Image (cartoon, rainbow, N blue to C red):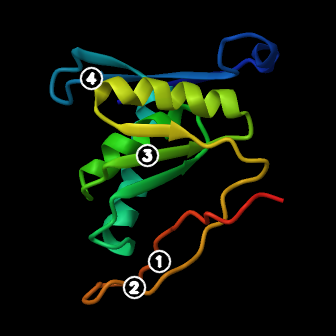
Amino acid sequence: MRENCGCHTGNRRAPSADIGGSVLVFDRATGVHQALLDGSVLTARRTAAASALGAKHLASKEARNLLILGAGKVAAQLPKAFRTVSPIKTVRVWNVTPDSAERLSEDLRPIGWGAAGLRLDRPPEVHSAEPPSGSPLEAYFATISSSPQH
């Protein structure tokens, strides 16, 4: 496997990413090229999978709601990753740019998610809760504060 990465800081003003990369996969025995993978997609999926693995051990087994802070490439991968470890039914998305949160929510709805963008002046308040009984680790899971905005 070989990785190739390039940084193009001028792309910040363009619709292109400022960092791009590819992962080339070769057969170990023969050296024959097997695959060319988009590095940014692979990184987003790996990050989402690592997050879901942490939630598997730290979150309540009864969790049905997922709060995503951010609306980028990793955020788009989180619902599917979390559903592999928890029976998530509802997704709420908050982003500094509310339109981005709503766009991600719109993308998630047709594939079976009860998703909605949160239009808040500031990030949702997150509180810790008692760990579920029998948890292998001391667990904390997030709840969205329904207090009025100031």
Q: Tell me, yes or no, whether the two marked residues, 4 and 2, touch with CB atoms within 8 Å.
A: no
Closest to the camera, between mark 4 and mark 3, is 3
What kind of element bears circle 3? strand
Q: Which residue is mark 2?
A: 131
In x, y percent, where is residue 66?
Answer: 43, 54
Q: Kindly identify the residue that appears in the image at 72 percent across and 47 percent down.
A: 120
Q: Tell me, yes or no, whether the two marked residues, 3 and 2, touch with CB atoms within 8 Å.
A: no
Q: Which residue is mark 4?
A: 26
What kind of element bears circle 2? loop
**Kind of residue sitting beneath label 4:** Phe
Q: Kindly identify the residue that appears in the image at 16 percent across and 21 percent down.
A: 30
Closest to the camera, between mark 1 and mark 3, is 3
Q: CA distance from mark 1 to mark 4?
A: 41 Å
Q: CA distance from mark 1 to mark 3?
A: 18 Å
In x, y percent, where is residue 16?
Answer: 66, 12
Q: CA distance from mark 2 to mark 1?
A: 6 Å
Q: Tell me, yes or no, whether the two marked residues, 1 and 4, touch with CB atoms within 8 Å.
A: no
Which is more N-terminal, label 3 or label 4?
4
What kind of element bears circle 4? strand
Closest to the camera, between mark 1 and mark 4, is 1
Q: Tell me, yes or no, whether the two marked residues, 4 and 3, touch with CB atoms within 8 Å.
A: no
Q: Which residue is mark 1?
A: 140
On the picture, is 20 further left or further right than 24? right
Q: Tell me, yes or no, whether the two marked residues, 2 and 1, touch with CB atoms within 8 Å.
A: yes
In x, y percent, where is residue 88?
Answer: 31, 53
What kind of element bears circle 1? loop
Q: Can you tell which quarter of the image residue 96 is in?
A: top right
**Kind of residue sitting beneath label 1:** Tyr
Mark seen at residue 91: 3
Q: CA distance from mark 4 to mark 2?
A: 45 Å
Q: Tell me, yes or no, whether the two marked residues, 1 and 3, touch with CB atoms within 8 Å.
A: no
On the picture, is 8 further left or further right than 142? right
